[in-house]
Amino acid sequence: MIKSNSCDEIALAARNVRKSFGSTEIIRGVNIDIRQGERHALIGPNGAGKSTMFNLLSAAFAPTSGEILLNGTVINGLEPAEVNRRGLARSFQITSIFPRLTTFENLRIGAFARYGVRFNILSTANRLRKANEEADRLLRLVRLERVASELAGNLAYSDQRALELGLTLATDPRVILLDEPTAGMSREEAEYATSLIRTVTEGRTLLIVEHDLDVVFSLADRMSVLVHGQIIASDTPAEVKRNAEVQEAYLGQEAAAC
Amino acid sequence: MTATDLNIEDSNRTSARKAPGLGLLLITGVTVLLFTLPLLIPPVFLNYAIKMMVAGLFALAFNLLWSHARLLSFGHAAYYAIGAFAVIHALSLSERGVLSIPTPLIPMMGLIAGALIGLVVGYLATVRGGTYFAMITLAVGELLLSIAPKWEAVFGGESGLSSMRMPWAGLTFGMVGEVYIVVLIWCLFGLVLLRWFSATPLGQIALAIGDNEKRLRFLGYRTHAVKTVIFSLSAAVSGLAGGLIAFAMESASFELFAGANSAMPVMHTFLGGADVFLGPIAGGMGLTLFSELASNASRLWLLYMGVIFVIVMMFAPEGLAGFISRHVKLSLTCWRLLIADYAVFLSGCAGLVLSGVWMAEVSYRLMGTSPIVGLTPDGTITLFEWTFSATSKPLWFAAVAVFVLSLFGVLAAAKRARTTWLTIGQKKDGLR
């Protein structure tokens, strides 16, 4: 496990985090450092606690003990809205968009938050130039111009996933957490999504939870392996591949299945 | 950029894009008609018109919460009644010369009172969503209903309060025509206000709350605050509606708080169509007119209203406006194929209504529950100036036959029309 010397290089960190549901301890003392500007993947076999860890890092769950630090400040226990305002945004594994709004309007909702026009009832949404321009930019970024005025609920699945990504980016977060962004996609769709994620997270910090190891190895600068609620390795993909413990616990299992 | 004006009903959007002139013409025409109505119809119908417009506005205010944020309130009578009492108090203050606001502006007191109480109740109720929200609004409504008759200074006890509209700028407000115009202007104001709201950022955010509140929180929104503001706006316009009724009647009593007044906007909205902007207005105006006319014509009018509501909810859950607009949209391209089915369907409906009403009315008289409407000693009854024997076998046979035949006609026509649409839909898909 790589220790960092100064705190300000670390964008997001977990310190001795534990989480129990009832009498079952799912996360058993996790330490993770996600460095400023890196693409970090969290992998692990089914039931290892990846989703729980993801929810802890995005402050959706409060840890039973331990701390989650965003740029050096504790964020556990804060409201999701507050965490977002501090520069952390997350996506959802189950597509979580606004089906009665158009693609464009979905992205504009994010832009409203960014430009602080939440309670504006004095001008129509179409007149707010900055928010509309920002929504247009996001639309191009996630390559959804062709379905801009379709209701989001009617979009194809892969377009909805792209919109999910766009929404996550809409508040201009510095730290982005993506929960299985390619789940349920075909091979081509997953490759497309991976390239999209690479482009849009340029210059930002990314934590990605992913099942698809092809996606992980092509995207991540570093990765952490979670097994039975504990991190057993946290290193570059090449090093992690060589790690015997990891091979036994996770990769070997996958290889045997293949 | 193609995403334009937010519109819940997307058919409105396409039609507006196709012919903006037509829509404008229609709006102007209806507005002119509404303003000239006092010259066209007798005063008693103007009273109906006032009640209809207020019911429409009230339903629209209620539906702001449902159509956007998917919050279902069962206690909107509270804000309606508080608006009414605010206006009565303002009227009597102005009558005593304490307060000097122009009489036509007094309904605004209902708006303000509704907004304030809405802010308080909204803050409490919107902590929860779904069923819990509905239960909290219901409980607050019942609470106010139980307090109102006991608090005489504010709500006038069992007998309620009354006041007078003071003359202003040469207008006496003694004629129903003048009152009608004031009510009309305020209703249009409320309508424009709610329509405008839908197009603002907050209106869009309200829709997003109804879709996915959790996601909104993770985008940095404090959704409780947003819901409180929307609730307050809905209560404000409900207060305006109540205020307008008080303004027109020059009185208000605690009965305005009754649960029936909370049920009213819910029924109006769902019957008219919750997801079409004008649906609640159509439902409110239609049902109010129906209840005014039917309650004069028959003692069974509540039964008929209930049956209509059940049938609409079972077969057209999108409401009448939604049902009609969907049918018009579907049929515009292929009306020649469908016109026969529509004719059968509509005449079947007429047959069902005629035979059903006949059987209900005659059975009601045969039950003999009320001496006024019971049978004459010789077993004949008079319905709509037609005297016949209530137990006549041929008449009953005919009624049952018409009912059954109409039912079959309606079902068969609906089935055929559905098949036609499916075929056309498949052809279109094939072309694509």
Image (cartoon, coloured by chain):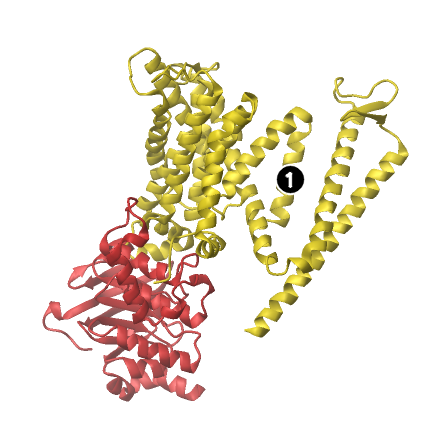
Chain colours: A red, B yellow
**Along the line of sight, which residue is nearer the eye, A62 or A40?**
A40
**Along the line of sight, which residue is nearer the eye, B228 or A48?**
B228
Task: Tell me: residue B173, above or below residue A208.
Answer: above
Q: Position of residue B149 (x, y in %)?
A: 45, 18
Q: Residue at x 27, y 66 (%)?
A: A137
Q: Position of residue B134 (x, y in %)?
A: 46, 40
Task: Tell me: residue B17, above or below residue A222.
Answer: above
Q: Would you identify the image quadrant in which residue B339 lies? A: bottom right
How many labels, in total? 1
Task: Tell me: residue A249, above or below residue B104.
Answer: below
Q: Going by the image, does A83 lie left or right of B185?
A: left
Amino acid marked by disc 1 = Ile
Residue B74 in view, yes or no:
no
Q: Going by the image, does B181 lie left or right of B264?
A: left
- In which quadrant will I find the N terminus of chain A? bottom left
Q: Residue at x 44, y 46 (%)?
A: B24
List the residue tagged with mark 1: B308
Q: Position of residue A169 (x, y in %)?
A: 28, 65
Mark 1 is surrounded, within 10 Å at the Cα level, by few (under 14), some (14 to 19) or many (20 or more) other residues, namely few
Residue B309 in view, yes or no:
yes
Q: Residue furthest top?
A: B96
Q: Position of residue B393 (x, y in %)?
A: 90, 34
Element type at mark 1: helix
Q: Would you identify the image quadrant in which residue A244 lies? A: bottom left
| Chain ID of residue with mark 1 | B
- In which quadrant will I find the C terminus of chain A? bottom left
Q: Residue at x 27, y 71 (%)?
A: A207
Q: Going by the image, does A240 lie left or right of B152?
A: left
Q: Going by the image, does B219 lie left or right of B240?
A: left
